[in-house]
């Protein structure tokens, strides 16, 4: 059973387009993290959201935590080829982390 | 801050041999480290939680006798893949928590180790 489901699983878009990635669970999380991973490397932390309804912005990336703290979304505005990578949400009970199923994003120049 | 290193970055071994992977927290002490496994194009799967000075906690379906974890100090955890087989070939990643800040449980990841068993 996957604790965190992400959608879409794969996404290929043209440079300049906008996109949204979703992370959903039936469980409540005290915090949820978003990571970006490039091939052959470890995941890099992008943001942590803690409060239900919280919205955080990181340049062209906007992260939102659902009011019930069961889901989250990542919105990228005007995607660039450098945004290409595997995006992962993660959360869990206490300090154990379970990762979402992942969203592989390809931005075509 | 919060840098985690892994060694080696890649290793090729013959079937039946054992391989040790090291995970170090370079600028903080980590009482807990985590080991993950990742197959191509897939997400990370938690294998075990490594606790300093005590036995590791393994996730369901992970063979503890095959994946030996030792967390001998606050900055080092090791994963030994014993009697490796080709199906053990994967990308192994460790992570560690910096000291807790409020309700945040942020993990910082090592760069991963690519294991190929021939």
Image (tube, coloured by chain):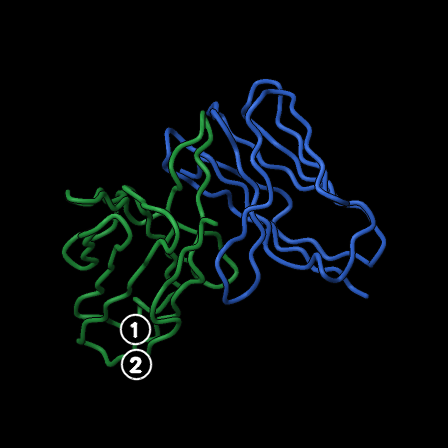
Chain colours: A blue, B green
| Structural distance between the alpha carbons of marks 1 and 2 | 6 Å
Q: How crowded is mark 2: few (under 14 residues within 10 Å), some or many (20 or more)?
A: few
Give SS at disc 1. helix
Residue that mark 2 sits on: B118
Instruction: Please report whichever mark, 1 or 2, sits nearer to the chain's N-terminal start.
Output: 1
Percent position (x, y) of residue A12? Answer: 73, 57
Look at 65% across and 21% down and name the residue there: A53
Give the chain of mark 1: B
Q: Residue A60 carries which label?
A: none
Look at 48% across and 23% down and name the residue there: A28
Residue that mark 1 sits on: B86
Give SS at disc 2. loop
Looking at the picture, does residue A73 appear above or below residue A53? Answer: below
Looking at the picture, does residue B69 appear above or below residue A76? Answer: below
Instruction: Classify residue A89 as left or right of residue B65.
Output: right
Look at 24% across and 59% down and name the residue there: B78
Instruction: Classify residue B85 as left or right of residue B95.
Output: left
Q: Kindly indicate whether the residues beneath marks 1 and 2 are on one polypeptide chain.
A: yes
Percent position (x, y) of residue A105? Answer: 67, 55
Q: How crowded is mark 1: few (under 14 residues within 10 Å), some or many (20 or more)?
A: some
The tally of labels here is 2
Percent position (x, y) of residue A44? Answer: 54, 52
Q: In which quarter of the image is the C terminus of chain B?
A: bottom left
In this orientation, which residue lies closer to the viewer: B39 or B111? B111
In this orientation, which residue lies closer to the viewer: A60 or A69? A60
Percent position (x, y) of residue A43? Answer: 51, 54
Q: In which quarter of the image is residue B99?
A: top left
Q: Quadrant of residue B58?
A: top left
Looking at the picture, does residue B15 appear above or below residue B57? Answer: below
For the residues labelled 1 and 2, say whether their Cβ atoms are less than 8 Å apart: yes
Instruction: Classify residue B16 as left or right of residue A107.
Output: left
Q: Residue furthest right?
A: A16
């Amino acid at each position: 059973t996957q604790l965190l489901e992400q959608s879409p699983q794969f996404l290929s878009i043209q440079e300049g387009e906008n996109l949204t990635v979703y992370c959903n669970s039936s469980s409540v999380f005290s915090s949820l993290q978003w990571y970006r991973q490039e091939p052959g490397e470890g995941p890099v932390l992008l943001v942590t959201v803690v409060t239900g309804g919280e919205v955080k912005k990181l340049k062209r990336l906007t992260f939102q935590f659902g009011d019930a703290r069961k889901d989250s979304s990542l919105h990228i505005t005007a995607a660039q080829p450098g945004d290409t990578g595997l995006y992962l949400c993660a959360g869990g009970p206490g300090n154990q982390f379970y990762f979402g199923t992942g969203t592989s994003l390809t931005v075509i120049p | 801050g919060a840098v985690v290193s892994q060694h080696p970055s890649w290793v090729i071994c013959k079937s039946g041999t054992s391989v040790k992977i090291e995970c170090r927290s370079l600028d903080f002490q980590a009482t807990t480290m985590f080991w993950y496994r990742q197959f191509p194009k897939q997400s990370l799967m938690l294998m075990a939680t490594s606790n300093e000075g005590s036995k590791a906690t393994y996730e369901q379906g992970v063979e503890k006798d095959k994946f030996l974890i030792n967390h001998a100090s606050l900055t080092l955890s090791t994963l030994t893949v014993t009697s490796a087989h080709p199906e053990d070939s994967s990308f192994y990643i460790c992570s560690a928590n910096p000291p807790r800040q409020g309700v945040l449980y942020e993990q910082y990841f090592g760069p991963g180790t690519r294991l190929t068993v021939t």
